[in-house]
Image (spheres, helix red, strand yellow):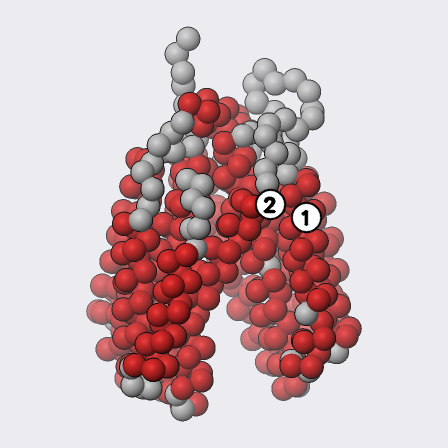
Amino acid sequence: MTETTAGPGAGRLGAAGAAVAGAAMVTNGLAYLLPMLGARHLAVEELSILATVLALVAIAGVAGVGLQMAIAVHRARHPGAPTYRVTLITTAVAGGAVVVATPLMMIALRLSLTVVALVAATTVAVVLVARWLGELQGEQRFLRLAWAMGVVALGRYGGMIVALVLGADVVDTLVAGMVTSYLVLPVVAWIARPARPAGADGDSPTGTAMGIRQVASAGTAALAMLAVSYADLIFARQLLSPADSGAYAVGTVLTKGALWAPQVIVVLALPRLAVGDSRVRTVVLSIVAACGAVLVAASALAGGFAFRLVGGEDYANLGEYAPYFAATGALYALVFAAVNAKIAAGARWPSAPLWVGAGVLAVLTMAVAPHTFQGIMWCALGTAAATALVMVLSLPPATASTTRRRDAPAAQAVAAGNDD
């Protein structure tokens, strides 16, 4: 009997990639639109509360990012493996952490008990939905994943946007966002309903149950990526004048654009990386590096336009620095791809170089480099380059064990037969 690997064809994969990229654009667009509307409809104090809550949910929601990545890797290796128990544990830990931090948030951030309760409730919904996103990603049902991502974005941001437009205050806006986050859960569960491979019988989940350690490893890596890629912005806020820190914030928009632009490639590749496909890992790193090179070249040619587009005419004179911010983002995109490859390979501490990089950046900016726009920019670029080099060189040898090779065709068959 000849073994086949009937994964999604090139045409279907291209359509899936476009769909996932579109869903990511919708998510990012709604995430940007919400604070813009808040600035127009809320008083300054209420706008500050909204921005703080969004940041807190994003930080606590890192547990959901880790859950999605861990489930995607596990489902790629073990199609049909149960994920219910680990989802409940992860959700309970994330929600519990917010509850435990309630006194700190009320005192340090001056949030009311009602607002903190809404943070905890929304966090639970954000983490819960990651289960189905991870299952879809791991089973390579990317078109359904794109639909699910769009629905999640509407649930997470759409309710708050509608509430703001209708003139709600900040508490009512947050309530609307919490309610819609829960309302979309059954919709996403329906989109991710189990797909049955040809010849399968029985409806019960099968396969090896995943452990919480896998989620903790992926979640810690996601948190480290968030910390190291945003650290320079925080240091700029702390060390520079308001005018210079504002200019630096505009530059970091270019960094984030270069960081996230090629990430759809990583989303599509993670299931194949999980089954030890060394060729895919090489292709992913090459594509991400090529995307970064193109973005850096474009920013070098049109740096003034890039700063003008992001921040307005007042920042056009900073165009000469655009390639450096873009290069920082491109290097972190490479780091993100390498982190995913390490998680897929089952590395024990995939985030270690990232935490070291964040610490080095802190020392350089606080104690070594001049406290200037350029000083922080060069520290960020140097740290990104060193971290990317370490991450790529420390990637484990790609091997596909007998078990992974045996599981891969089953997962790919699910994707090929059920991604509609």
Q: Residue at x 24, y 58 (%)?
A: 293
The first of marks 1 and 2 along the sequence is 1
Q: Secondary structure at mark 2?
A: helix
Mark 1 sits on what residue?
Answer: 89
Mark 2 surroundings within 10 Å by alpha-carbon count, few (fewer than 14), some (14 through 19), many (20 or more) = some
Q: Residue at x 38, y 63 (%)?
A: 356
Quadrant in the picture for the C terminus = top right
Q: Decide if residue 297 is in sight here.
A: yes
Q: Amino acid at mark 1?
A: Ile
Q: Is residue 43 above or below residue 94?
A: below
Q: CA distance from mark 1 to mark 2?
A: 8 Å
Mark 2 sits on what residue?
Answer: 212
Q: Residue at x 37, y 81 (%)?
A: 366
Quadrant in the picture for the N terminus = top left
Do the numbered discs 1 and 2 sit on residues whose CB atoms are within 8 Å?
yes
Going by the picture, which residue comes out furthest to the right? 114
Q: How many marks can you see?
A: 2
Q: Residue 208 appears at what percent x and percent y?
A: 59, 30
Q: Is residue 325 above or below residue 182?
A: below
Q: Nearer the viewer, residue 190 or 338?
A: 338
Q: Residue at x 32, y 64 (%)?
A: 384
